[in-house]
Image (cartoon, rainbow, N blue to C red):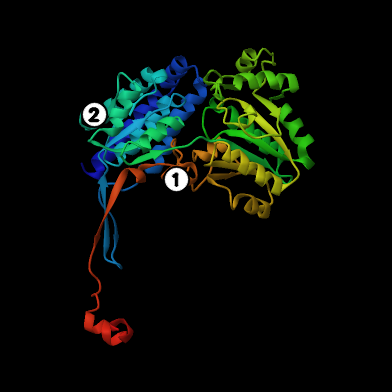
């Protein structure tokens, strides 16, 4: 198809996603029990609007660039069929996002839903396919497994016609994608540490953190997991957090909540995407109805300290640090405990501190003075592609540290014209006598 034909199809898909955003969000919450309808609607609209706007003018057909000075043409070639692995935490927005970037690049896509989100994922894929067909796309361009099982997913990933895998899910699934023998874009977990330096605008920093951490009840992997707060401003930050809806757990309450964060050494799926009141009830404690996030003061890092892991819920660890160097060392430990390559945040007004803190951090996204949820996916910052698949690079055992987008789903062929002659053997010998000895 021509660029114009593909662009018409992608526009139709984005329009349909926009129209169905709220209904798909409600389906996702009902089926999975994760998050809330308002924020899942926003996620669907982020894919339909922000992602679409970031790719709609990208050339993906034929000669996409001509470098006449160096006599090189770059030609786009689709990868073919994309295997789209979909998580239960973002089941409909991921389908919208991956459909748009796959089709824009000239590919077909087959989705493998999480078994706990099979209905809403299939419905999102159906909406995308029907919208594509209305604009002239062939039948079956966007498809979805109807019986999602691990063997079915593995067969899809290893199929001879699969060109590339877009794997969003747990570490086990990502490892399967990388070991399938096919090219794969996998992503890692995000155990995001956020440093609040004494130069920060405290009220604004807390506002952004609360908004980010509570979005869809913490189901986006770029959401804040631990706050690292300078000792000199601790009291002000604690007061501001309480003022804006945080509930600080006492030692007994912390111990009870820790008991429901992890089960058998892993994150308890039952707390994922749940409201703080629900998590508190599970732990046998009661918190006020207006509480937005549960916070526990912490000193250690590792599985024996459940608040230090990625929790995918409105729960936060709170660390007190003596300054930037201690914060930097602690952030490194937190990333090594389960978030290498993903995201780090900092709130500060002193740019020298910002540069010193971020320069050596093993993270693909370092978000400054913004909520990491929205900064990480490219909603509130420039220079980060709007995306719902966030690579962690070699640090996180991923092939890319980029926010995956349309550019990752087509190959570039280079048509290169000869512009100079290779020196002949006798010419080389005359210029470099030593080479003949």
Residue placed under numbered mark 1 in the picture:
402
Query: Residue 379: where, in percent of width, then height?
Result: 50, 38
Residue 81 visible within the image: yes
Give percent across and percent down for residue 154.
32, 29
- The residue at which mark 2 appears reads as 133
Answer with the quarter of the image where residue 291 lies: top right
Q: Is residue 131 left or right of residue 312?
A: left
- Taking the spot 79% from the left edge, 35% from the top edge, the residue there is 235
Q: Quadrant of the C terminus?
A: bottom left
Mark 2: few, some, or many residues within 10 Å (few <14, many ≥20)?
some
Confirm or deny contact between disc 2 and disc 1 (CB under 8 A).
Answer: no
Outermost residue toward the front? Answer: 437
User: Total of numbered circles in the picture?
Assistant: 2
Residue closer to the observer: 167 or 70: 167
Mark nearest the camera among 2 and 1 is 1
Residue 371 appearing in the image: no
- Res. 145 image quadrant: top left
In this rendering, position of residue 201 left or right of residue 87: right
Q: Secondary structure at mark 2?
A: helix
Q: Tell me the quadrant of the picture where the N terminus can be found.
A: top left
Rendered image: mark on residue 132: none
Which one is in front, 190 or 367? 190
Residue 331 in picture, x, y percent from top left: 63, 42
- Bin the neighbour count of mark 1 within 10 Å (Cα to Cα): few under 14, some 14-19, many 20 and up: many
């Amino acid at each position: 198809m021509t660029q114009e034909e593909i662009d018409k199809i992608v526009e139709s898909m984005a329009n349909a996603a926009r129209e169905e955003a709220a209904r798909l969000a409600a389906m996702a919450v009902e089926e999975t029990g994760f998050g809330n309808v308002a924020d899942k609607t926003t996620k669907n609209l982020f894919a339909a609007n922000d992602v679409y706007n970031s790719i709609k003018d990208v050339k993906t057909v034929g000669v996409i660039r001509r470098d006449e000075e160096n006599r090189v043409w770059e030609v786009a070639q689709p990868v073919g069929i994309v295997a789209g692995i979909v998580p239960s935490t973002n089941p409909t927005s991921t389908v919208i996002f991956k459909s748009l970037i796959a089709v824009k690049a000239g590919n077909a896509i087959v989705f493998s839903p999480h078994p706990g989100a099979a209905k809403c994922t299939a419905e999102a894929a159906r909406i995308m396919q029907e919208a594509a067909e209305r604009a002239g796309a062939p039948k079956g361009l966007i498809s979805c497994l109807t019986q999602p099982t691990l063997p079915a997913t593995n067969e899809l990933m290893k199929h001879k016609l699969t060109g590339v895998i877009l794997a969003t899910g747990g570490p086990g699934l990502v490892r399967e994608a990388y070991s399938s023998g096919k090219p794969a874009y996998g992503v890692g977990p995000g155990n995001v540490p956020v440093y609040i330096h004494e130069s920060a605008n405290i009220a604004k920093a807390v506002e952004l953190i609360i908004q980010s951490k509570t979005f869809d009840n913490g189901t986006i992997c770029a959401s804040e997991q631990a706050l690292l707060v300078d000792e000199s401003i601790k009291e002000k930050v604690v007061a501001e957090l309480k003022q804006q809806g945080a509930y600080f757990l006492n030692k007994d309450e912390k111990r009870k909540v820790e008991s429901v964060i992890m089960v058998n050494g892993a994150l308890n799926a039952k707390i994922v995407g749940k409201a703080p009141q629900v998590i508190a009830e599970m732990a046998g404690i009661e918190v006020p109805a207006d509480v937005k996030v549960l916070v526990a003061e912490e000193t250690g890092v590792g599985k024996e300290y459940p608040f230090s892991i990625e929790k995918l819920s409105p729960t936060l660890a709170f660390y007190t640090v003596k300054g930037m160097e201690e914060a930097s060392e602690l952030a490194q430990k937190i990333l090594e405990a389960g978030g290498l390559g993903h995201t780090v945040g900092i709130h500060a007004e002193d740019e020298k501190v910002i540069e010193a803190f971020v320069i050596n951090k093993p993270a693909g996204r370092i978000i400054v003075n913004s909520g990491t949820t929205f900064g990480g996916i490219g909603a509130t910052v420039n220079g980060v592609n709007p995306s719902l698949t966030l690579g962690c690079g070699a640090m996180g055992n991923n092939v890319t540290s980029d926010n995956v987008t349309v550019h990752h789903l087509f190959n570039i062929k280079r048509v290169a014209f000869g512009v100079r002659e290779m020196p002949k053997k006798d010419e080389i010998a005359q210029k470099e006598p030593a080479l003949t000895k």
